[in-house]
Image (spheres, rainbow, N blue to C red):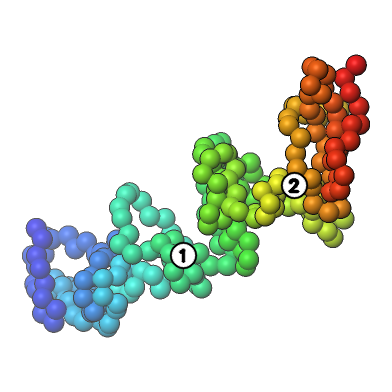
């Protein structure tokens, strides 16, 4: 049987009744926590202090007294079984983030158990200024990776305008541009470093003569000489196209 007990009143129950003290979190939609005590056959309920409205609270059993406090402020760790919804957010740790639906502290991590159930795998770790995905584990994405506020609208890796893919050198002292597109809509490879094509080749397809390049640069391309032969050409900032080689 379930019976409502008004705050500040007590109810005497039959001796054969088994008294089950609260063991799960309680949701209170008011600004008052409720503390209960069992005195022989009398169950007392009275105001225990203020809590934030609309919050989950937890119960702590000391002797025959069940104290209630905000679950969000309780220390320690635990496991929540079953399924359900959190109305506002989940905050973890002593100094969690102050916004977002899942709020972690510095160096807080979201982890899952590996397929063998033998060890933990890091899904996401939030350090002071770096967000780490996987942390030592391969990360697979079943969809495109978009970077920036205005990324490309197609492709597996989608960069925004003037964005770059950079790499650190072996001495960990200098950064090099691996690939980018400059303001003239020119794709730049290896700016500041060398491109190694060892055991590989560069395939170039014939095209019409391009315009002269900017100062201190040159363009290399293939073109048809008008008689079915392929020419290897170069064009500098001044002067006309120059033939480097021609198909025999």
Q: Name the N-terminal-most of marks 2 and 1.
A: 1
Measured as percent of width and height from the top left, residue 59 is found at: 31, 69
Q: CA distance from mark 2 to mark 1?
A: 40 Å
Measured as percent of width and height from the top left, residue 73 is found at: 40, 73
Measured as percent of width and height from the top left, residue 44 is found at: 16, 76
Sort mark 2 into few (<14), some (14-19) or many (20+) by Cα contacts within 10 Å: few
Quadrant in which the C terminus appears: top right
* Residue closer to the observer: 228 or 22: 228
Measured as percent of width and height from the top left, residue 142 is found at: 52, 37
The residue under the point 68% across, 51% down is 184
Which quarter of the figure has residue 30?
bottom left
Against 194, residue 105 (above or below) is below
Q: Which residue is mark 1?
A: 103
On the question of residue 147 being in view, the answer is no
The residue under the point 83% across, 54% down is 215
Quadrant in which the N terminus appears: bottom left
The residue under the point 82% across, 41% down is 219
Q: Which residue is mark 2?
A: 188
């Amino acid at each position: 049987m379930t019976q409502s007990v008004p705050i500040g009143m007590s109810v005497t129950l039959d001796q054969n009744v088994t008294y089950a003290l609260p063991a799960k979190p309680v949701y209170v939609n008011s600004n008052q926590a409720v503390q209960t005590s069992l005195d022989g056959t009398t169950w007392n309920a009275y105001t225990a202090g203020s809590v934030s409205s609309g919050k989950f609270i937890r119960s702590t059993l000391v002797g025959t007294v069940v104290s209630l406090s905000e679950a969000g402020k309780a220390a320690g760790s635990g496991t929540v079984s079953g399924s359900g919804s959190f109305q506002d957010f989940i905050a973890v740790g002593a100094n969690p983030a102050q916004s977002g639906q899942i709020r972690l502290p510095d160096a807080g991590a979201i982890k899952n158990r590996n397929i063998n159930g033998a060890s933990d795998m890091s899904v996401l770790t939030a350090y002071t200024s770096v967000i780490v995905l996987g942390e030592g584990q391969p990360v697979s994405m079943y969809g495109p990776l978009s970077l920036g506020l205005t990324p490309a609208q197609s492709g597996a890796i989608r960069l925004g305008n003037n964005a770059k893919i950079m790499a650190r050198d072996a001495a960990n002292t200098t950064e090099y541009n691996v690939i980018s597109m400059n303001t003239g809509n020119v794709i730049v490879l290896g700016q500041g470093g060398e491109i190694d094509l060892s055991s590989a080749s560069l395939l170039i397809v014939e095209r019409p003569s391009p315009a002269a390049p900017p100062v201190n640069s040159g363009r290399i391309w293939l073109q048809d000489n008008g008689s079915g032969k392929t020419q290897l050409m170069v064009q500098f900032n001044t002067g006309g196209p120059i033939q480097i080689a021609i198909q025999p």
